[in-house]
Image (cartoon, rainbow, N blue to C red):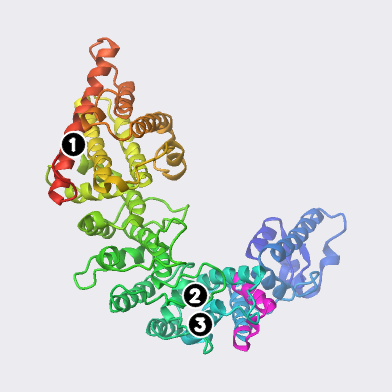
Amino acid sequence: MHELEAGAAAEGVYIQGNGTVIPRQDGPYSTEHLEGAGGRQTLLGADGPTAAAVEAMTARIAEVLGRSEDADTTAARALREIVGEDRDTFQPAGPVGMENAEQRQGEADAREALRLIESGDYETPEGAARLNDLLETHRDNEHFAVDLATGLGAEGTLSFWADARITDHTDGTPPSDAYTRTIREMRENLGITLGTATRADDPRMAEWEERIVALGLHDMAPADQAHPLYGFQAMSDLMHHGDYDDGFLTTYGDALLETDRNLADGTDFWVPDARTHFVGDDFRSDPMTGFLTGLSASPDAATAFFTAEEENDHATYLIRERHYPDTAGEVTDNRERIALGALGDALYAGATGMDPNDPTAERGDHTPGQEAVLHHVLEVESGAKNDLPPELREPTARLLGDYRTEVFETARNPAGSGLPLDAEHLAVVTAQISRTPEAYETLQGAMAVEFMERIHADTSGDPSRVLDDIGWAAGFLDQGRFAAPEIDKANSSWAGQQAYDIGGYLIGDIPWIGSSLQSGLDQLLGAWTQHQEQTIGNGLQDSRSDYYGTSNQYLNGLADQWMRLNPDPLGAEDDVWQTETQQVVRDGARRSDDEARRLLIAAGLITED
């Protein structure tokens, strides 16, 4: 309405309280005077000079009302409240703005939602659909969210969701597809709503949050259910969606991990043998999955959560000590443990400040806290040696890709001092990443971007300045590829590996490079792909000396990219300059490979030849 009023003033017209539009005048015929005198007919003729402006403004009001009704339920209801049911007249009820209307609507609809839940009407398809509509409409409305959460209370919130999730409400027959879709949508909408509530500046939420944590090991399932559904399980299921307050997340996570640590070792406490029947197939009995998913959506909370503390080292417990269920519902079709995938996302968020599942997340400078998480993760993962969970290889490759400059500076001089990363930690983690060919590809793609940027920044004409460093970094990382089959021997996932398509992957998923470098990067990645296909085609039997020989198309491609910006300064034959330049890269790669292998032997991952 403020925009309409401003627009009316600019056009020289005025919107009266009854909704009519009149010319704006000064003096005795001011808008205030006209408002009281009803002077529209006295000043405005049908063909007067302001008729067009009046008609245009009237049409704009009608358009806003119509558009709001179609696209924004909250705004439409607020406008109807101001305008009244008769759109020909305005009926303002005092100084009522959109914000106040949103509050009143949220509070009113929260009362309806509470009635649906407390009466049990949500158990019918119609009631569930109505409740879901209310949640979807107001999931970002903090007035609705807080009133719903505190109206239910912590016990009511968890009991309601446990009942909605594990009871089909169809007299023992499987729930319909439509009802199942409603419950899945409701999980998202309720999760977002509760996240909104935790972020609201409302003192009522403090008690709710405290009780949610305290109820973590209380059975919230209905009395007629044979198997328990604990508070942590119900709340974590909702945390798959929503942006929760950082303080609540860390407090909740601390309590969950403390409880989890005290469970009997090696048991699937969260997953009973006779499983409760849930609506849908996306319920994860392991509460760590939902919590870690919620944590990855709040990178600042993830950073705080994984900051190393000697007595509360969450990263070490989750990466190296915890037992993860691998029962039905807790693993993917490829038998990967879902909770560990969520852990990888949360570690990435904590070390980078980005939600890995948000395609709009922007990469920024790393904070000291994020860097501390990275160092700790590498320390913990390298300490796991060959027992690092395979589900963490791909997320760790993405994480190192985000720190590609630090990886480069370490890999180019692994025996140096004052390195940004610990060289042994990096060598060990790189070898673990490389045990999964797709994760190895992810890391190599990110580093190719780093190589290209450094190549394009160097026009010195001296290949020993940048190309030697690039060769060292490439060789250090490729040692992981040699170590992987040696670690896994006959069970190596490299056996039967098919051709790569790294170019397409990189263009779509690593937006870290300017368009000016894209063409050269495409050519470089094409050379990398060709060399990998050749190596795989040879059964990975190439010796390391052969691998770093003249046939390595990738290393040659790096040299060729540099030569485009650095033609032979002495005017020698092109093939001589090319041979010398390519040799610089190959020599650096071979020497660095030797150094990386020494570190892996020292760490006990592989043995002397």
- Looking at this view, name the residue that lies furthest to the front: 490
- What kind of residue is marked 3? Thr
Q: Secondary structure at mark 2?
A: helix
What's the residue at 30%, 66% (across, down)? 318
What's the residue at 20%, 43% (across, down)? 410
Which residue position is annotated with label 2? Answer: 194
- What kind of residue is marked 2? Leu
Q: Position of residue 251 (x, y in %)?
A: 34, 76
Q: Are marks 3 and 2 in contact (CB under 8 Å)?
A: yes
Q: Secondary structure at mark 3?
A: helix
Q: Main secondary structure of the magenta part?
A: helix
Question: Is residue 122 one of those drawn in magenta?
Answer: yes
What's the residue at 33%, 31% (across, down)? 538
Q: Position of residue 221 (x, y in %)?
A: 49, 84
* Nearer the observer, 579 or 210: 579
- Disc ID at residue 592: 1
Q: Are marks 2 and 1 in contact (CB under 8 Å)?
A: no
- What kind of residue is marked 1? Ser
Residue range of the region highlighted in magenta in the rendering: 116-136
Which residue position is annotated with label 3? Answer: 157
Q: CA distance from mark 3 to mark 2?
A: 10 Å
- Does 554 appear above or below 442? above
Q: CA distance from mark 2 to mark 1?
A: 52 Å
- Does 401 appear above or below 28? above
Q: Is residue 215 left or right of residue 581?
A: right
Q: CA distance from mark 3 to mark 1?
A: 57 Å
**Around disc 2, counting alpha carbons within 10 Å, would you say few (fewer than 14), some (14 to 19), or many (20 or more)?**
many
